[in-house]
Each structure stands twice: as C-alpha cells, then as structure tokens.
Image: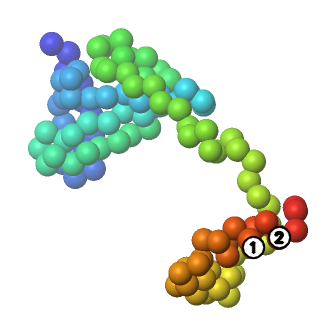
C-alpha cells in the first residue's frame, strides 16, 4: 500500500494512506489543493498543490474532487455609492415597521436608474 508523507502544522511530518487524503481542483482556474485529517491530532489540514502534486497524488489513487466557483462571481454588480452608517440605520428603522416590505418595494421602484 502507498504511504504518503505530509506535514501537519501542529504535529510535523505524518504518514498517510491514499484514502486519508482528498485532492480538490477548481475547474475555472485549475488551482489545486489537498486535504487530510491529521492522524495524530485530528486537525483538518489543507495545503495548496501544484499541478505536478495533483497529478502525483491522483495517480497514486487519491480521490479527486472537481469544484467550480459560484456563478454569482461572474454576474455584473451594481456600482453605486457605498452603504453608509446612516443608510444602515435608516434600513434598520424601516425593518422595525409592520409595512417595511411594501415601503421597500416602493423605494426601489422610485429609485433613479443607474
């Protein structure tokens, strides 16, 4: 059985089996990482991994998980003025009323377009 040596920030070098690790790769930018639970202290350890390390670990049988960035990151964002303390206080006061939702809809409808 393949043994993999990794480093825990608490315990130092630890010996792991293939099933003790998981490799994760982002499908958007191909950034990789691996993670494991330290067998000595049970700390969850996550480390960045180059493409070479990802290939080496997966070819040894380590599970590969591919994930994607949330779609919301690519959505256009409103570029308006920053929320001020006064804005937050006004919103808080609005939420304390029983008709806040209707008032909020009306405020949005009457707001100038950006």
Q: Looking at the image, is 62 positioned above or below residue 22? A: above
Q: Looking at the image, is 48 positioned above or below residue 16? A: below
Q: Which residue is mark 2?
A: 111
Please report contact status of discs 1 and 2: CB closer than 8 Å, yes or no.
yes
Q: Nearer the viewer, residue 80 or 107?
A: 107
Q: Residue at x 39, y 25 (%)?
A: 65
Q: Residue at x 60, y 31 (%)?
A: 29
Q: Which residue is mark 1?
A: 107
- SS under mark 2: loop
Q: Position of residue 99 (x, y in %)?
A: 59, 78
Q: Quadrant of the C terminus?
A: bottom right
Q: Residue at x 64, y 45 (%)?
A: 73
Q: Position of residue 59 (x, y in %)?
A: 36, 12
Q: Is residue 6 left or right of residue 17?
A: right
Q: Position of residue 12 (x, y in %)?
A: 22, 45
Q: Residues within 10 Å of mark 1 (few under 14, many from 20)?
A: few
Residue lying at the far left of the rendered structure: 40
Residue 85 visible to the viewer: no
Q: Quadrant of the N terminus?
A: top left
Q: Residues within 10 Å of mark 2 (few under 14, many from 20)?
A: few
Q: Position of residue 3 (x, y in %)?
A: 19, 21
Q: Nearer the viewer, residue 16 or 92?
A: 92
Q: Looking at the image, is 13 positioned above or below residue 78? A: above
């Amino acid at each position: 059985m393949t043994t993999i040596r990794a480093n825990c920030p608490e315990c130092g070098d630890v010996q792991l089996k293939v099933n003790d690790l998981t490799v994760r790769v982002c499908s958007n930018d191909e950034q990789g990482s691996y993670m494991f639970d330290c067998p000595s202290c049970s700390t969850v350890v996550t480390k960045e991994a180059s493409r070479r390390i990802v290939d080496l670990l997966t070819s040894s049988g380590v599970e590969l998980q591919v994930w994607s960035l949330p779609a919301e990151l690519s959505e256009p964002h409103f570029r308006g003025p920053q929320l001020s303390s006064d804005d937050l206080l006004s919103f808080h006061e609005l939420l304390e009323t029983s008709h806040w939702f209707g008032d909020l809809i009306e405020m949005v409808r009457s707001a100038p377009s950006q």
